[in-house]
Image (tube, grey):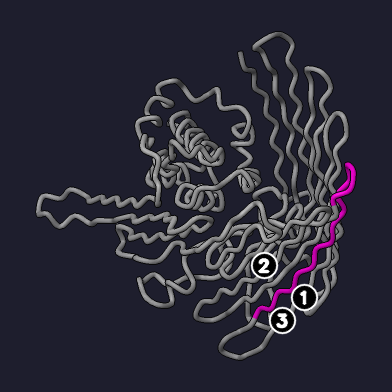
Amino acid sequence: MRGRLHVAAATLILLLLGRAGRVRAQELSADVFPSEDELLQALELGEISFREFILLQELATVGLDSTQLYLLDDIPNLVYLRERLKPVSPLQLEQAQGFLSRLRPEHGTVRWRFSQELEDNNTGRSRYRVDAQLRPAEYWQSDWRVHREFSGRERWIRRAVTYRRNDRVLRQVTLGSYITRFGLGTVVGYRGKLLNFSDQLDGESFLFPDYGGFNGVYARMQGRNVNSELMFSYTRDSTHELMSSGAITELHRLTWHPGLIVAVNRLRNRRTAVKAHDVKIAAHGRGRYAYGYTEAEFTFQTGDLGGAMAAVVEGRHDLGEAGVAYAFWAYGNRFADLMSGSKATPISRTVDIPAVGFAFSSRRAGQKGLFIRTSVQPAKRTELVGSFLYGGFDRNDNRIQVSGEGYY
């Protein structure tokens, strides 16, 4: 069973990476393998955590493109699958090919899937999925998704309208649901769901979908030597609302790209009208050299939630037939990851903000960790891969994972 679930998860990653390749002639359906029932079974068996279950479920629903592959870092058990898909057998590949659309969609695609439990008295529960990606005009795309569960819960999952054009200074504008990450994500990134959502197909569900990304407006601009991104997001449930805004500016000079990131979060209790502000400022840099790259981000937090600092460094160094990828991270005890999506191991602790009556699960406040992955090719068509992952809050609350694999 464990092997089957891991292969199913591997096939999901394969399909997602296929979508990331933007192959226009063949559109991959990213939510074929594994099924939601298989993911739930993996959760019940303890093979994946609840956060990993939610992330895999959302990726299967929404998909991801090449700019969002960092989301797979949140699933340590699948750390190799981004680059090594060999464990997926030819049979799984053949099955996946059966769900490819051979016709090039000119104006978009609409998918409707319906499932019903079989009962003797014909009273079995049912669920459906409606996913639509439409291209009404050149440079424009819209995305609409509605889901109903066997439990009867019915809600909007995503709705977005995007303008994208690569020959202008204004490269992209998205209105609605979106995912983005500034730099290494300590300030702005994919955190996952923080607030609750409506379980009915109503106006509240349309305005605030069951979506772990952002909800608002995103814009990306690119000049000759400067890149800038802006974001605004507003989410709420029956008790709280979170308003977030952020910006990043990067200079592109030679091999080193320095940048500055600023973001402000306002968490408000809707019943008492009490607010708490969180401000983050980060210096970010990314550089390439002959044998690899290094990227670093250093963040300072201030505001009502208290002062804290964070640092994340990652990179890769290649030398002939061997290579090493590495990442280090450290977060202050009072670091509030209200919309952070930077590296951290999937262990968490509860952070309480008593002023607004809000508590949430944080994977970053107080966590320190490192990840090292090495690969060696001793012979043609042969590769040995090993990795070490550590992350924790203290001596009694940490996670260590050591892995080794060989490919031939």
3D distance between C-alphas at marks 3 and 2: 20 Å
In screen coordinates, is 271 left or right of 274? left
Give the label on residue 305, or none. 1
Residue at the far bottom in the pictured view: 272
Going by the numbered disc 3, the residue's amino acid type is Ala
Q: Is residue 291 visible?
A: yes
* Highlighted magenta segment, given as a residue range: 252-267
Vertical placement of 220 versus 108: above or below?
below
Identify which amino acid the numbered label 2 is placed on.
Answer: Met
Let me know if residue 262 is in the magenta part.
yes
Q: Is residue 99 left or right of residue 318?
A: left
Q: Residue at x 39, y 45 (%)?
A: 105
- The residue labelled by disc 2 is 231
Instruction: Say if mark 1 contacts mark 3, CB within 8 Å.
Output: yes
Assess disc 2: are there few (<14), some (14-19) or many (≥20) residues with their C-alpha within 10 Å of its C-alpha: many
Instruction: Look at 81% across and 77% down and name the residue there.
Output: 303
**Number of marks present in the image shown:** 3
Residue position for label 3: 276
Give the left or right position of residue 315, taking residue 359 as reference. right
